[in-house]
Image: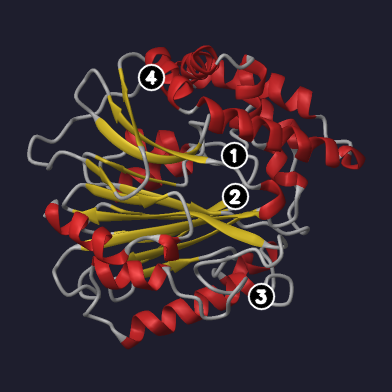
Amino acid sequence: MASSVVSTDAPPLKATGPAPIIQLRGTPREQGYIHGQCAREEILTNVITVRRTIAADAASRRDYTAALTWNEAFMARVAPELLDELHGIADGAAIPFHDILLLNVPVYLAAQFLPHECSQILLMPPATRDGRSYHAKTRDFNRAGTLRQAVLHRHYPNGRQMIEVNTAGTITWPGSGLNDDGVSISTSGVWSRRQTIDLDRTANAWFLINTHLLLRDSSSLDDVETHLQAQPRVTGLNIVATDGQHGAAFEATADEIVRHDATDGVVIRTNHYCAPHITHLGPTPAEHPSSHHRHQTTRAKIAARHGEWDFASLLALLCDHEGYPQNSLCRHADGGVGADTVYASIATIPNGELWTILDYPCHASHGESVLSHQAGD
């Protein structure tokens, strides 16, 4: 693991909200074992879902076995501690290692068009009323490919702490996370048929950007960009990150990173690119009306209350149903068709808090959530 200076001034991290928290301690393999033990049923459900997805993708002739073999060797070269942790998950869950590797090399996400859909919102001063920064994320999955999630609070032997929201059984692509340097990261997928997914690159690159490593090894926003630029990848993502002082969106393709710094304390990203020279690689409004609608309506709602935002109002925004069921921030599969929001999280900086619900955000008890958040102030 890369060395990291742990700040003695940062508040201890707090994982709050209605989601159960898995506390991980010890070596990578020991942390994996705890993860596997505590989330066995969720991991097994995810393995069954992924295997079903792969079986339905047989016509594509994607060579999943080769991609797994190549990427396992790549991981052993560049981050062997992660491979140790995956073995720990397999042992703790009593599930074959191959199935755990399958979850962590998510080639199966390419088996569905626009499968990994999310919304990201970062609000910083002057957009907030209390001088704090709030970083929100919703993760949406197609109902047929919904994967169970888990919240991991990591305690490393060197004193480092991180909280991540992961698909249960995975460590390589958390959707959101916060570390004890006050760095918060979230992601949203950008997919279209105009992107070429070259599985041969899995021999020397992560399939998805490894946000776990970005979070673990970064102590500032500039660190995030430096590590992101250096990280080889097969596919791109939208990433939003902040260190509490600065915030930005990073629009990543397989070969390029475009940084957009926060404007008036606001960053919003959904499932398309905004940089003009790469917009063609993402979905158009006609191809993905939900992504563009969520982006536009969120921007308008934030502008209408600029300077007044706090945790409670941001949580209310995540519950928003304008454009229901599929074009809203809180998305609901209609009759089993379309995407469901499977979790929502809000990081509060500099408080060191990550609030999470592993459900539709509209199912959160608003008053209790706000009181829980305020109790940590």
Observer-side mark, 3 or 2, equals 3
Q: How many marks?
A: 4
Observer-side mark, 1 or 4, equals 4
Which amino acid, by three-letter code, is at mark 1?
A: Arg
Q: Secondary structure at mark 1?
A: loop
User: Spatial distance from mark 1 to mark 4, Cα to Cα?
Assistant: 25 Å
User: Spatial distance from mark 3 to mark 4, Cα to Cα?
Assistant: 40 Å
The numbered mark at residue 267 is: none
Residue to which mark 1 is pinned? 233
Q: Secondary structure at mark 2?
A: loop
Q: Position of residue 60 (x, y in %)?
A: 88, 42
Image quarter of the C terminus: bottom left
N-terminal-most mark, 2 or 4: 4
Which amino acid, by three-letter code, is at mark 2?
A: Gly
Residue to which mark 2 is pinned? 236
User: Spatial distance from mark 3 to mark 2, Cα to Cα?
Assistant: 20 Å
The numbered mark at residue 289 is: 3
Q: Residue furthest left?
A: 9
User: Spatial distance from mark 3 to mark 1, Cα to Cα?
Assistant: 27 Å
- Front-lying residue, 143 or 122: 143
Q: Are marks 3 and 2 in contact (CB under 8 Å)?
A: no
Which amino acid, by three-letter code, is at mark 4?
A: Gln
Q: Are marks 2 and 4 in contact (CB under 8 Å)?
A: no
The numbered mark at residue 31 is: 4
Q: Are marks 1 and 2 in contact (CB under 8 Å)?
A: yes
Task: Determine the residue positioned at 50% across, 19% down.
Answer: 89
Q: For residue 51, say whether it is visible.
A: yes
